[in-house]
Image (spheres, helix red, strand yellow):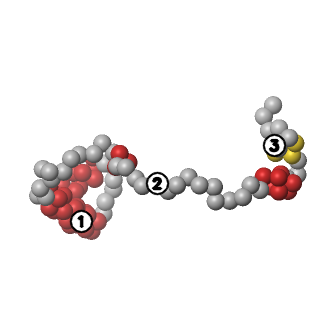
Amino acid sequence: MDPKTVEHVARLARIALAEEERAALAAELGRILAFVEQMNAVDTSGVEPMAHPHDAVQRLREDVVTETDQRERFLALAPLAEDGLYLVPKVIE
């Protein structure tokens, strides 16, 4: 990518670039575009497209309780508690 193209793209994006920034950015964008071309050269004909990476099935751990019930202990530490619930000051009227 040449500095003239970088200047044009910067103007479209409303980005102010100094002369030395244009040359450096032109070289960097050229490397990025070369990498994209390299990726386009990879044969992906046998790869099924995915709509979302989370569509893949993930192994899940067993849903097992690992901690003891400490509800009463924590309620005892609260400034105000009643019927197993924490009481807090009213903030919305």
Identify the secondary structure beneath mark 2: loop
The residue lying at 77 percent from left, 56 percent from top is 70
Considering the numbered disc 3 on the image, is that residue within a helix, a strand or a loop?
strand
Label 3 – label 2 distance at C-alpha: 32 Å
Quadrant (top left/top right/bottom left/bottom right) for the N terminus: bottom left
Judging depth in this view, the residue of 87 and 22 nearest the camera is 87
Estimate the x, y position of residue 67 in percent, counting from the top left: 68, 59
Q: CA distance from mark 1 to mark 3?
A: 59 Å
The residue tagged 2 is: 60
Residue 4 in sight: no
Q: Earlier in the sequence, mark 1 or mark 3?
A: 1
Quadrant into which the C terminus falls: top right
Residue 23 picture quarter: bottom left
Circle 3 residue: 85
| Mark toward the start of the polypeptide (1 vs 2) | 1
Q: Position of residue 16 (x, y in %)?
A: 33, 56
Instruction: Name above or below for residue 76 compared with residue 86.
Output: below
Residue 33 % position (x, y): 18, 59
Number of the front mark, 1 or 2: 2
Residue 43 percent location from the top left of the image = 11, 56
The residue nearer to you, when weighing 4 against 44, is 44
Q: Which one is in front, 34 or 77? A: 77
Q: Which mark is residue 28?
A: 1
Q: What residue do we see at 52% from left, 55% from top?
A: 62
